[in-house]
Image (cartoon, rainbow, N blue to C red):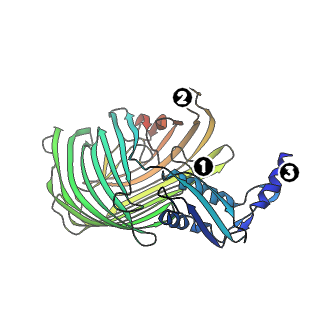
Amino acid sequence: EYTAWRANRRPARSFTAEAVEAFVASPQGGRDRQAEREIERALEADRAVPLGAEKFARPTPGVVHLEQSMRELVGKGRFLSSTYEAAPDRRTLRVYAEPKPYLPSLLYLSPSIEASEYLGTRAFLNARLVRYDPVGYGSEARLDLNLGSRNALDLEIYRPLAGRFFGAARLQASMEPWEIYGTDGKAGTLRRESLGAGIDFGLSVGNRMEARLSFDAGKARTLRSQGDASLEAFDGPESFASFRLKYDGLDRAMVPTSGALASLDARAYLETPAGSQGVRRLQGSGAWFLPVGNGSFFSFARAGTVFDDADPSIPFRLGGLFQMSAFAPDEMLAQKYALGGVGYMRQVGKLPLGLAAGTLRLGAWAEYARVERFPVGIYRGWSFSFGGFAESPVGPVFLGMSTDAERRHRLQFRIGRLF
């Protein structure tokens, strides 16, 4: 009877939308046309897509995509719920959204912990305060605060412009340790301090892709906090123009099992804190997950290069999970590098109900890297890792072991985003 009910229900919802029409009630009465236009824009990709049923009443990819879009719409925090139906003409997709009665500032908290041998523990608390509509409908004020091993404060005012374009202004301040390693191990620690501001002009493509053209200016310096007195320090202005592109098509933020992730960061420095001018820097990364049965194959890659002379104030910092895992986080400074890896993870159970309803997975991967170290030297090598991934109330958790051909053995523990 249930199968027959589903079969009858799906065709009733089956149609191909040629237009999207949204209905949102305004708290002051009537309809909120600004909110309706935002929904219509967000669901534009669902136009002209068959929203029918396959054999045995299985929803088509069009239905799956539409319902995912509806969940993301509610997940943005502006609406309590949403639903949809076909208009009587069978050519219009009608969407109904119930707005929240008020939009208070929202506070999000998440811890990050990273621990491995020879390094001790890095721990800090991430906090984000979001205020909606501070400078017009659809705008956001975002205050990000990191406290702990790394201290940082980032304030961004985001405002949508015409169509899918947007603008943003930013203020940033940070203080973090830079651990410097030599051939005989850790040589010392520098403390990097920076203060700056930036402005962005960007384009948002759906809910998964974003491109930004930016200009940043400020000041940065390093201070020796411990170790060799000969460690090179710098103090000076920093300014650069950049182009950033990010795509996030992963199915979940904690421990993904399908989808892809990619990013690109291209920078042209007018001036670096070390005094160099005209330095160009490029970095890209990506990851891909393919579900197979009760598990997933995954691969990842990243590469970066500084096209001009080496500069001690803007090196790439490598080490840690999925970035040469057998090395300590940020252990290696690089002028140029390329690394990639492949692995497999499989679900083996769920966490106890008292902890969370998240899944528990076991996985292993291998990665290879070629690094032109700063200031001199080339490293080539493999590393191998295995361990458990879990979804918990405080975020994704990893516990495992990494090793390489040079007999580095490192116990890894992390709380925080993995990819």
In this view, 18 is above or below 406: below
User: Badge 3: few (under 14), some or many (20 or more) residues near its Cα, within 10 Å?
Assistant: few
**Residue 347 appears left or right of 306:** right
**Residue 394 appears left or right of 97:** left
What is the x, y in percent for residue 155?
29, 53
**Residue 301 appears left or right of 283:** right
Instruction: Tell me which residue sits at (41%, 34%) in the image.
Output: 410
What is the x, y in percent for residue 182?
25, 43
Earlier in the chain: of badge 2 and badge 3, it is 3
The residue tagged with tag 2: helix, strand or loop? loop
What is the x, y in percent for residue 185?
27, 38
Label drawn at residue 155: none
User: Residue under circle 2?
Assistant: 355
| Residue 199, image quadrant | bottom left
The residue tagged with tag 1: helix, strand or loop? strand
Front-most of 328 and 381? 328
Of badges 2 and 3, nearer the viewer stands: 3
User: Badge 1: few (under 14), some or many (20 or more) residues near its Cα, within 10 Å?
Assistant: some
Q: Amino acid at mark 1?
A: Phe
Q: Amino acid at mark 2?
A: Leu
Label drawn at residue 4: 3
In this view, 325 is above or below 305: above
**Residue 112 appears left or right of 311:** right
Q: Amino acid at mark 3?
A: Ala
Earlier in the chain: of badge 2 and badge 1, it is 1
